[in-house]
Image (tube, rainbow, N blue to C red):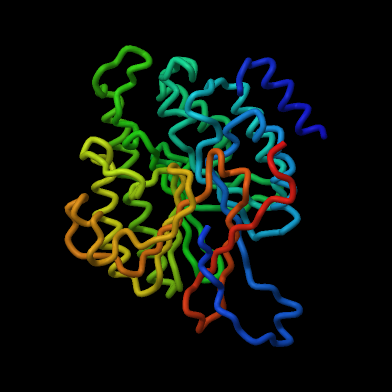
Amino acid sequence: MRRLSFLTTMIATAAVLPLTVAAVPARASTPADVTRAAPTFAVIGDLPYSTTDLASLPGWIDDINAADPQFTLHLGDIKSGSTRCDTAYFQAIRQQFDAFTGPLVYTPGDNEWTDCHRTAAGAYNPIERLATIRKIFFDQPGVTLGQHPIAVNSQANRGLPENVSFARDDISFAALHVVGSNNDLLPWDGIGHTATTYLQRQEQKRRMSATIDEMNATFANATARSNRAVVLFMQADMFDPTYTPTPADISAFTPLVRNLVKAAHAFPGETYLLNGDSHAYNSDHPLAAGSVWLDRYQVKGSADTLQRITLDGSSSANLDYLKATVNPEGAEHVLGFERVPYSTPAS
């Protein structure tokens, strides 16, 4: 396959290794169902992580293309944090992304820029790698990736072309550039920094401010349009249930979480938060009344209608992709979710 051959060549050149399911409520079939299937979209993330994943990626994209979702979301981390952040690798992944027949919306993860200071990742300056990611993947601001792209609202005028929003099927969507490693406030020790640098703090502050503005605008627009739901997607797992975080692990997320609680609580529809980062499928309500996360982020109030879903990723990313189905008016929930196995496992 030509795409796979290209990847193999690029890897050699660059010397790199580079879901409980929320059930869809049953309903009786009608004649309209025969001719008009419910709208769907696909969600992936934290892949490819290895040379094996990379070899299997063309087949996984073919599976998603065959399912013909309205669009696909990639939640970031297009490589392992311990493999090199070389430009040639990024270009190879971009070529793969161009194989999606439908629109593809990609939001960056920490592995492709924040963590690139690590020796194993090439000891790069992360801010320089972020600029490279934007140049390669967001070269046409306001337009998605994929062979049949769609127009989206972009924060390119604020220097963040990756932060985009759009609406489909009475649902508002927003890509939020929020990543692990405490949103890039962990020290770049791989290039000799034992503490967070001034440039790090300034970049993070600017990006978080813009991201909060985009999120709030998405909720405001959804309310004005009487949308049924808001879907936010990002790389970072701000509510990782696998460990007890220290304030230094999650401090950068605090302003976003506090604004999210206010916005989701006020919004009359449902809110969905899709994230990668922690790699194990999980569906929960981390900001509902009584949640420990309200205390950890020192939040007043709650967002009981917010459902969070974490994708399978890393070593589990080769198992399946997440299929989201827009349920009809009157269903218990706006979206139903299903983990769809790939037809060909990682080779």
**Going 69% across and 73% down the picture, which residue do you hit?**
37
Q: Is residue 212 left or right of residue 333?
A: left
| Placement of 82 over or under 268, stated as above or below | above
Q: Is residue 37 left or right of residue 251?
A: right
Q: Is residue 197 left or right of residue 306?
A: left
What is the count of numbered marks? 0
Q: Nearer the viewer, residue 342 or 32?
A: 342
| Placement of 8 over or under 293, stated as above or below | above
**Going 46% across and 37% down the picture, which residue do you hit?**
109
Residue 230, percent from left and from top: 43, 64
| Placement of 331 over or under 89, stated as above or below | below
Q: Nearer the viewer, residue 347 or 162?
A: 347
| Outermost residue to the right | 1
Residue 48, percent from left and from top: 60, 36
* Residue 29 image-quadrant placement: bottom right
Q: Quadrant of the C terminus?
A: top right
Residue 154, percent from left and from top: 47, 47
* Residue 26 image-quadrant placement: bottom right
Residue 322, percent from left and from top: 58, 56
Q: Quadrant of the N terminus?
A: top right
Q: Nearer the viewer, residue 221 or 175?
A: 175
| Outermost residue to the top | 192
**Going 62% across and 64% down the picture, which residue do you hit?**
40
**Going 64% across and 72% down the picture, which residue do you hit?**
38
